[in-house]
Amino acid sequence: MLKREPASIIAFAQKNGGLIKDVDKLVDSYPRVPITVDCVIFGFDENELKVLLIRSDIEMYKGKWSLLGDFAADNEELDDSAYRILKQRTGMSNVYLDQVRAFSNPKRHPGGRVITIAYCSLLNIQHHELKIHDNELHWHSYHSIKEMAFDHKQILETCYHWLQKRIQEHPLGFNLLPDKFSLRELQNLYEAILGVTLDRRNFRKKFASMKLLIDTGEVEEDVPHRPGKLYIFNFEKYEKNKRKWTGIDF
Amino acid sequence: MLKREPASIIAFAQKNGGLIKDVDKLVDSYPRVPITVDCVIFGFDENELKVLLIRSDIEMYKGKWSLLGDFAADNEELDDSAYRILKQRTGMSNVYLDQVRAFSNPKRHPGGRVITIAYCSLLNIQHHELKIHDNELHWHSYHSIKEMAFDHKQILETCYHWLQKRIQEHPLGFNLLPDKFSLRELQNLYEAILGVTLDRRNFRKKFASMKLLIDTGEVEEDVPHRPGKLYIFNFEKYEKNKRKWTGIDF
DNA sequence: GCAAAAGTGTTGTCCTTACACCCATGC
DNA sequence: GCATGGGTGTAAGGACAACACTTTTGC
């Protein structure tokens, strides 16, 4: 098999005698790649981390579960693609959304080379009732997911690790909870995502000392035990005091 | 102006009566986008963080500095593109390299929509002598860089923040130093990248307690003061003890 | 009254910070 | 001998981990 040296912009510049005037021609000379965006949408319910999946549209992956994805439309910023996909598939908007990384293995799509950019979104399952049920769209317990279409299992795992890391540095967890929540719900969420058990008193002290929770004065209802206080998250205060940190720790 | 609903894979599936058999046809129906990879290559010399830049090939950016970039070749994984670009432009291989994120603003390239994936590399300026000097390739002090071609300034800043964060969680700094280094060099590097001053005794205690430095028994030479001990980094031990961390801190 | 979870403080340990003096070398 | 950075210890304060009992509610 012959190994071809990949073409390059250097060659283009040389052929065009140094400075490139016609940038359109330059860009036309680039190989073009189909780009998709895949959204990993996490939710939290029944003390479990959930993820929103659909049945794959592709026959060879028949029965397999798939992330919510679509190609990036012409002249669409990728963040906008991700919001559009969320909206199209779930009817939801106003959710937390962040780019995680690109997956570019040339064999990852059976139809040819497709690069996908993974996005992670977090949303509150109660708040956002699913209005669209195409392709059996529904929530799956994260830990019960085994096989998936394409390389989506790998993407899902990457996003899960991303979430584990992020939730320890930013209060993203609040995007997964109702506006008003009890400290027990908050702790359950951290335990479920991090896969650890935490000391209740220390957990409460930690959040109390951060002063990011506002006591609503309300308490839980319809619980068969002493009701917990309900809090809301002080987003404003958090935004003002974004951490500055110079510790070194590895 | 008319707002067109973007096309979508959902429409394709409906038109093809549910399950998609012909995946090649599916992928053919996707819009294709030129993809480039841009490498932000950091080095450290004379107690300063440096970055490797070239003059832009593009006439409209004449005189401006540019990251080392090129388009992604056919069927090339993006990591490989980044390694290839490094090799082509600098002659270097065996460097630290990590994907940072995609930049997809439709207006970021004057020749039309081009999505770029930014990679960050760290290397030791002494070790890797530049063998290629096309486009005035050379090291710039990070803080002296003002204007750049395209959105490269923004990409550079994103990578710098990425580096600041990563260097506190992983000992990436060692990729920027010679194999044998003194504690003063190590501290200078941290101070330069983080933009802080650190207490010398505490810094040394911190690294001593991690036991990741191996005393070579050698000392600096040709310094006009008491020579410092030279250490090498214990990569093997670091790899074994990757941190497990369950603290919450924001 | 019993089941179930809410709520609450203290102590010891460890990590972080702040801080000042003598030492080895080149000139 | 002087200039320059190398090398070291201690004490105080803050964060974290471990640990048990009383309270409130629904049934």
Image: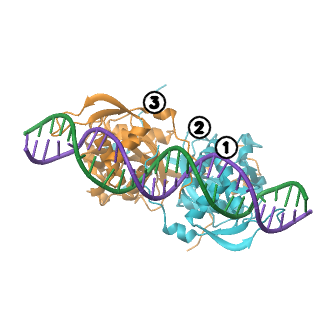
Chain colours: A orange, B cyan, C purple, D green
Report, in whole angstroms, how far the alpha carbon at label 1 lies from the one at label 2: 13 Å
- Identify the residue at horizontal 67%, vertical 51% (top origin): B191
Task: Check if mark 2 and mark 3 are on a common chain.
Answer: no
What is the number of callouts on the image? 3
Tell me the residue that label 3 is attached to. Answer: A236
Tags 1 and 3 touching, CB below 8 Å: no
Tell me the residue that label 2 is attached to. Answer: B107
Provide residue B80's location: percent of width, then percent of height: 57, 62
Q: Which amino acid lies under the numbered mark 1 shown in the image of this protein?
A: Val
Is A186 or C17 nearer to us in this picture? C17
Q: Which amino acid lies under the numbered mark 3 shown in the image of this protein?
A: Glu
Residue B191, label in figure: none
Provide residue B54's location: percent of width, then percent of height: 73, 51
Quadrant assignment, res B189: bottom right
Q: Chain ID for label 1? A: A
Tags 1 and 2 touching, CB below 8 Å: no
Task: Check if mark 1 and mark 2 are on a common chain.
Answer: no
Is A130 or A1 nearer to us in this picture? A130
Tell me the residue that label 1 is attached to. Answer: A23
Q: Which amino acid lies under the numbered mark 2 shown in the image of this protein?
A: Lys
Query: Is label 1 in a helix, a strand or a loop?
Result: helix
Report, in whole angstroms, how far the alpha carbon at label 2 lies from the one at label 3: 32 Å
Query: Is label 3 in a helix, a strand or a loop?
Result: helix
